Image (cartoon, rainbow, N blue to C red):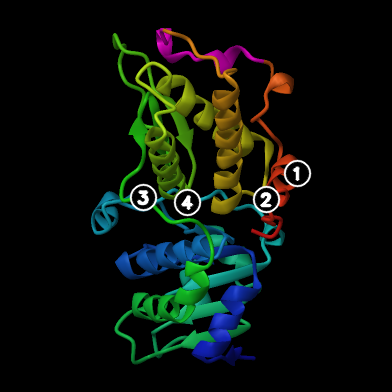
């Protein structure tokens, strides 16, 4: 029995309703299915929701050239790990491929522009007048723009790289031995959001002349440590939660600077900082998620549902 066809308003409701989503593209991915999946995942991230992309085949370099990016396809084992499963630009369940065939009876929503779509999903948003599924994703983005603008921090124009700290979406290939030590990496899908926060914190502290050329390595190193430890201790991470954890560390450093208790190494040998040698229990800024929530409630900010 074919699934139900829904309209754009209903599609918008579905996107807003679910928080943990699997996005599936068709086998032998082309720029439309891949771009649609990436675009939809980006929309979910801006709504502070979690989305993963799965595809039956490795993304080839030629296809990636269209996007100047090679997305990491998440290892997906069980449909039960997700609240909702969406297929984009997949006209028939036969196009899922062998490795994803097991999901064919569990597809909650199909977003497609092919008039030949077999309506195999429980619900389908079909716009045969659209030149590509990517056009549909763009229409959806415009519908959700106001919701997205209210969700999550701003983003930087480029990823942060300074004061021996690099924020990236993935680790770079290991370089050959070098005279200079490797920088301190923060690897997160929210690299641009976190980079934006680093820029704003830098500007705020520099405007009060609180950080100089000697103390900046410790300062930004501590922010990076706070981000990495928050990532390591929390399973459900959003851009806001991660940025709030780092902002909490910035508040702690600010208090230390005013009190004259902020310590740093005069020379950062091997990119080491004093914070690396302090036990977590003694740190004022390294806080678990519940402590971050409690901290910001003192300022009238509730980030529990962020």
State if disc 4 and disc 3 touch (CB < 8 Å).
Answer: no
Q: Name the foreground residue: 7 vs 79.
A: 7
Secondary structure of residue under mark 2 = loop
Q: Using the numbered discs, state the Cα–Cα distance from disc 4 to disc 2 in whole angstroms.
A: 39 Å
Range shown magenta: 267-278
Q: Using the numbered discs, state the Cα–Cα distance from disc 3 to disc 1 in whole angstroms.
A: 27 Å
Specify the label residue 290 is tagged with.
1
State if disc 2 and disc 1 touch (CB < 8 Å).
Answer: no
The image quarter containing residue 290 is: top right
Q: Using the numbered discs, state the Cα–Cα distance from disc 2 to disc 3 in whole angstroms.
A: 25 Å
User: At which x and y percent is residue 156?
Assistant: 36, 50
Specify the label residue 156 is tagged with.
3
Q: Nearer the viewer, mark 4 or mark 1?
A: 1
The image quarter containing residue 306 is: bottom right
**Residue holding disc 2:** 299
Looking at the picture, does residue 305 appear above or below residue 140?
above
Secondary structure of residue under mark 4 = loop
> Which residue is depicted at the point 41% across and 43% down?
195
**Residue 214 magenta-drawn?**
no
Specify the label residue 73 is tagged with.
4
User: Is residue 238 at all visible to an observer of this figure?
Assistant: no
Q: Using the numbered discs, state the Cα–Cα distance from disc 1 to disc 2 in whole angstroms.
A: 15 Å
């Amino acid at each position: 029995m074919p699934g139900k066809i829904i309209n754009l308003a209903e599609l918008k409701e579905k996107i807003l309703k679910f928080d943990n989503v699997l996005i599936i593209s068709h086998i032998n991915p082309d720029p439309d299915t891949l771009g649609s999946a990436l675009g939809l995942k980006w929309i979910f991230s801006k709504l502070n929701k979690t989305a993963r992309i799965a595809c039956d085949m490795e993304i080839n370099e030629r296809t990636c050239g269209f996007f100047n990016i090679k997305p990491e396809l998440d290892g997906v084992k069980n449909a039960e790990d997700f609240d909702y499963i969406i297929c984009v630009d997949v006209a028939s369940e036969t196009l899922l491929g062998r490795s994803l065939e097991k999901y064919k009876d569990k597809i909650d929503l199909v977003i497609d522009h092919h008039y030949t779509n077999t309506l195999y999903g429980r619900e389908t948003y079909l716009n045969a007048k659209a030149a590509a599924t990517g056009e549909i994703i763009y229409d959806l983005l415009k519908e959700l723009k106001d919701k997205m603008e209210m969700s999550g921090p701003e983003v930087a124009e480029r990823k942060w790289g300074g004061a021996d700290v690099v924020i990236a979406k993935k680790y770079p290939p290991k370089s050959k031995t070098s005279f200079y030590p490797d920088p301190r990496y923060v690897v997160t899908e929210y690299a641009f959001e976190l980079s934006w926060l680093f820029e704003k914190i830098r500007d705020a502290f520099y405007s009060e002349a609180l950080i100089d050329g000697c103390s900046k390595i410790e300062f930004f190193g501590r922010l990076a440590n706070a981000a990495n430890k928050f990532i390591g201790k929390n399973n459900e991470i959003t851009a806001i939660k991660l940025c709030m954890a780092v902002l909490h560390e910035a508040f702690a450093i600010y208090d230390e600077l005013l009190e004259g208790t902020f310590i740093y190494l005069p020379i950062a040998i091997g990119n080491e900082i004093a914070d690396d040698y302090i036990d977590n229990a003694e740190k004022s800024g390294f806080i678990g998620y519940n402590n971050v929530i409690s901290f910001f409630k003192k300022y009238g900010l509730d980030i529990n549902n962020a």
